Image (tube, helix red, strand yellow):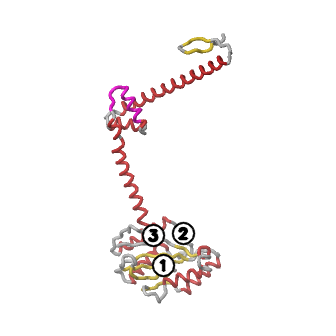
């Protein structure tokens, strides 16, 4: 059986005023007439408080606080093969058993679905915002999830197998998350297959060829960790040997970088020396290590 439980929308002066209604009483009256109107063809049964009793509750709550939450509304899809008395009994188990509320109105409707054309038996529930102990209800997202599970158990106790509909909000969050995880796993597998495709075509045997191989891999966007993984997985090297190759390459690169910096310093010194010579300044030169430098004063 497919089922759907809607989120709870609360009636209060702050929430209703200015949204086509002058007061919360007018908004609740419009909703009550919508769900419990005897002229509706799809209305099958109404159970619970009348509109006069709701007016008394509204006046009581507004007298205590002008923007007090008065009632909450939500809907529940019902099995088409149950009679109205069975549906009312199940809904009372939910409202009184889970929310501990004894003031509510239940309106059962049955019509043809607009999309599939199937029977669509459902209930609209208008529930007081205080429980039997007089405390206000605090319904957050986790409590709504527990309410869904509580309703599932009620259905299972009546012999129904609960399935989650693909296009319902409740199912879609779980399904989308699962689909994203599957897509990520498939992408990782494809990436692993294509990861070392270019490196497999390269050949190295000597130390010089090995260094050239690493340089080429780095130029293609691979990191040293990727190259190490390639050595271990594709070339069947031990982890220690692969690590030693990477460390040796790093040390060689550091030495080359150091030599480059030293060479740059020498070039800068020579340029300064040439500039002084062009200006006609006297400079004593001393040839040392293949580089012309100014003689230090003793």
Queried whether the magenta region covers residue 210, the answer comes back as: yes
* Residue drawn where x is 36% and y is 28% of the image: 209
State if disc 2 and disc 1 touch (CB < 8 Å): no
Q: Decide which of tag 3 and tag 1 comes sooner along the chain.
A: 1
Queried whether the magenta region covers residue 112, the answer comes back as: no
Question: Which quarter of the image is occupied by the C terminus?
Answer: top right
Which of pointers 3 and 1 indicates the residue nearer the eye?
A: 1
Classify mark 2: helix, strand or loop. loop
Q: Decide which of tag 1 and tag 2 comes sooner along the chain.
A: 1
Is residue 270 left or right of 209 when viewed as pictured? right
Which of pointers 1 and 2 indicates the residue nearer the eye?
A: 1
C-alpha separation, residue under disc 1 versus residue under disc 2: 17 Å
Classify mark 1: helix, strand or loop. strand
- Towards the viewer: 199 or 99: 199
Q: Is residue 267 above or below residue 61?
A: above
Magenta stretch, main secondary structure class: helix
**Disc 3: which residue:** 147
* Residue drawn where x is 63% and y is 78% of the image: 62
Q: Give the range drawn in magenta.
A: 203-217
Residue 223: name its quadrant: top left
C-alpha separation, residue under disc 3 versus residue under disc 1: 14 Å
Tell me, for residue 283, which label it has, or none: none
State if disc 1 and disc 3 touch (CB < 8 Å): no
* Residue drawn where x is 48% and y is 83% of the image: 35
Classify mark 3: helix, strand or loop. helix
Question: Which quarter of the image is occupied by the N terminus?
Answer: bottom left
Tell me, for residue 125, which label it has, or none: 1
What is the x, y in percent for residue 247? 43, 29
Tally the marks. Answer: 3
- Towards the viewer: 211 or 158: 211
C-alpha separation, residue under disc 3 versus residue under disc 2: 13 Å
* Residue drawn where x is 33% and y is 38% of the image: 233
């Amino acid at each position: 059986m497919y089922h759907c439980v809607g989120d709870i929308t609360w009636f209060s002066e702050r929430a209703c005023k200015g949204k086509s209604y002058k007061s919360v009483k007018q908004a609740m009256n419009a909703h009550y007439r919508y769900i419990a109107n005897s002229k509706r063809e799809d209305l099958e049964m109404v159970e619970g408080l009348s509109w006069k009793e709701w007016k008394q509750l509204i006046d009581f709550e507004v007298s205590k606080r002008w923007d007090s939450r008065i009632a909450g509304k939500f809907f529940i899809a019902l099995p088409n093969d149950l009679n109205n008395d069975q549906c009312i009994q199940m809904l009372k188990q939910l409202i009184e058993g889970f929310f501990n509320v004894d003031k509510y109105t239940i309106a059962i409707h049955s019509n043809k679905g607009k999309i599939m054309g199937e029977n669509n038996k459902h209930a609209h529930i208008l529930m007081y915002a205080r429980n039997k102990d007089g405390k206000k209800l605090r319904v957050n997202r986790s409590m709504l999830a527990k309410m869904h599970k509580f309703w599932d158990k009620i259905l299972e106790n009546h012999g129904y197998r609960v399935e989650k509909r693909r296009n319902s909000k409740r199912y879609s969050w779980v399904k989308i998350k699962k689909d994203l995880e599957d897509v990520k796993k498939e992408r990782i597998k494809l990436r692993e297959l294509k990861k070392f495709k270019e490196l497999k075509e390269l050949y190295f045997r000597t130390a010089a060829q090995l260094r050239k191989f690493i340089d080429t891999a780095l130029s293609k966007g691979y990191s040293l960790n990727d190259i190490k993984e390639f050595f271990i997985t594709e070339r069947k090297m031990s982890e220690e040997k692969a690590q030693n190759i990477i460390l040796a390459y790093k040390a060689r690169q550091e030495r080359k970088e150091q030599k480059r910096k030293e060479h740059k310093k020498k070039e800068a010194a020579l340029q300064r020396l040439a500039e002084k010579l062009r200006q006609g300044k006297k400079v004593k030169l001393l040839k040392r290590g293949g580089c012309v430098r100014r003689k230090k004063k003793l």
